[in-house]
Amino acid sequence: MLTFKTPEGQPFRILIDCGIHVSITGGPALVGDIVTNLKMETGGIIDILVVTHEHWDHVSGFLTANDLFKTFTIGEVWMAWTENPADAEAVELDKFKGQALAALQGAGQQLEGMQGLNPYMERVRDGLQAVLGFQFGAAGQRVRSARDAAAKLCAKAPRYFEPGGPPTSIPQLPGLQIYVLGPPRDKAALRLEEQAGAMFPLASGGPFTRALASGLESNKTSDPGFIDELSPFEHSIGTPLSVALSGEADDSAVEYVRKHYSEPIAHIAPQESPDQSWRRIDADWMGIAADLAMQLDRGVNNTSLVLAFEFIDSGRVFLFPGDAQIGNWLSWKDLKWQVGQGTVTSADLLARTVYLKVAHHGSQNATPQKQGFDLLTSGDLSAFIPTNKADAVKVHWGEMPYDGILTALETKTKGRVIRADDPWLAEKNGKPAFASPSGSVQAVRSAPRDPARGPGGLWVEVDLA
């Protein structure tokens, strides 16, 4: 949450996202405690609620703590153009997300029920569960429900933003203007298209999505009249695997499949063994789900609403990129704004950034070097990384935060980096390694540690200038 002062000395509060990943034990209860604390600190008044993008760890709180949020007074809700139901391109994007998600959910459920998967397919299964964790709650709630719950917290319709317009002004904060850097309109920048010939067209969900969905349907159906439109063979040739395994057909090929391919896959049998079940490849085709999952995850992250808050008198900038990944960042380079008699570019804003909320939990595939880190040249730069490495390891996210990014940040900021899992947050009266005031950081405070809740408190508060 950002708290500014109006000219009259009154607080003006902007809350950006509220959520936690589904894998975190006790996550909804923790979010409930945080929202309760927000209510106490704000008196239940949030002037602007910003929803950056449609991932569970960014919006789940608006659903799981909905009863609490309904007691707040929220002045406006801001979202990206990608969430606008009246925008044709956003609707097209929603079709892609919906079809891809349905296919991935089906693949995930089928892989969960299979025994003896090879190591690669085990990694695909685990990766699917990690990606689906951004789309569903523990009780099966859809991320769309959480996003819509956020939109309904204000009586007024949400405001939808996209790059290219003039900076946004807030009447109560005449010394501040806000630049919208993302998400882009370009599909290639959203990374829903990787290269020619390997695209995921939005309207149809893409060939991989259709193939995955069709394969899942043909595998589970026992309807002899089912027609797989993507089969390379004539409809009259072959027997569906589900029919072969059920024993409902008389074809001699069915008995052969059952005898040689449907036994439990406990190990790779010797070549002469009558049990040839190790030859089965009926799960391998679902390996394409890994590619589709990465495309969906990257695509949704690249729909993040990216906001740069500029203080007009000093020119200093606070940058909040959500989970923007490379495609979103690279789209900024051509952005320009006519302000007064001059021109402001994205490179100008990055050079004047003194506070950075690090994108996508500090992952390797966010914050590019040349179009990102190299342009962050302010000597007063400080950064915050909302991440927990232990949780990232638990759900197979890989190296998050990425060591290369951490090293670069430590150098750029002269050590003024705060992580959500910093050890000092678990200490009584803990303090960060850097002194304050230093750079843009004037003071740092953290919530008292509650042993019943585990390491760390509910909040970290940073005074910035």
Image (cartoon, helix red, strand yellow):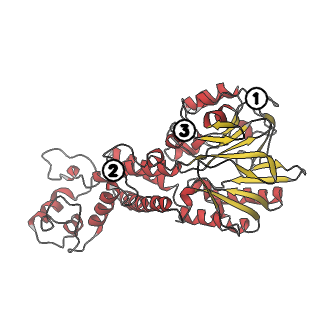
Instruction: Examine the rendered structure and indicate whether residue 323 appears above or below residue 83.
Output: above
Tell which circle, 1 or 3, labels the residue nearer the N-terminal end: 3
In percent of the image, x 18 and y 51: which residue is there?
276
**Cα distance, mark 1 to mark 3?**
36 Å
Q: Quadrant of the C terminus?
A: top right
Name the kind of residue labelled 3 in the image. Answer: Asp
- Point out residue 4 in the picture as x, y percentages from the top left corner: 81, 48
Tell which circle, 1 or 2, labels the residue nearer the N-terminal end: 2
Check the image and name the residue furthest to the front: 341
Quickly name the residue at label 3: 334
In percent of the image, x 45 and y 52: which residue is there?
296
What secondary structure is found at the residue carrying circle 1? loop
Residue 104: quadrant of the picture = bottom left
Residue 416: quadrant of the picture = top right
- Point out residue 378 in the picture as x, y percentages from the top left corner: 70, 28
Check the image and name the residue furthest to the left: 252
In percent of the image, x 64 and y 34: which residue is there?
350
Quickly name the residue at label 2: 288
Name the kind of residue labelled 1 in the image. Answer: Phe
Name the kind of residue labelled 2 in the image. Answer: Ile
Q: Nearer the viewer, residue 439 or 363?
A: 439
Q: Are marks 3 and 2 in contact (CB under 8 Å)?
A: no
Q: Nearer the viewer, mark 3 or mark 2?
A: 3
Quickly name the residue at label 1: 434
What secondary structure is found at the residue carrying circle 3? helix
**Cα distance, mark 3 to mark 2?**
34 Å
- Point out residue 24 in the picture as x, y percentages from the top left corner: 59, 53
What secondary structure is found at the residue carrying circle 2? helix
Left or right of residue 382: residue 100: left
Q: Nearer the viewer, mark 1 or mark 3?
A: 3
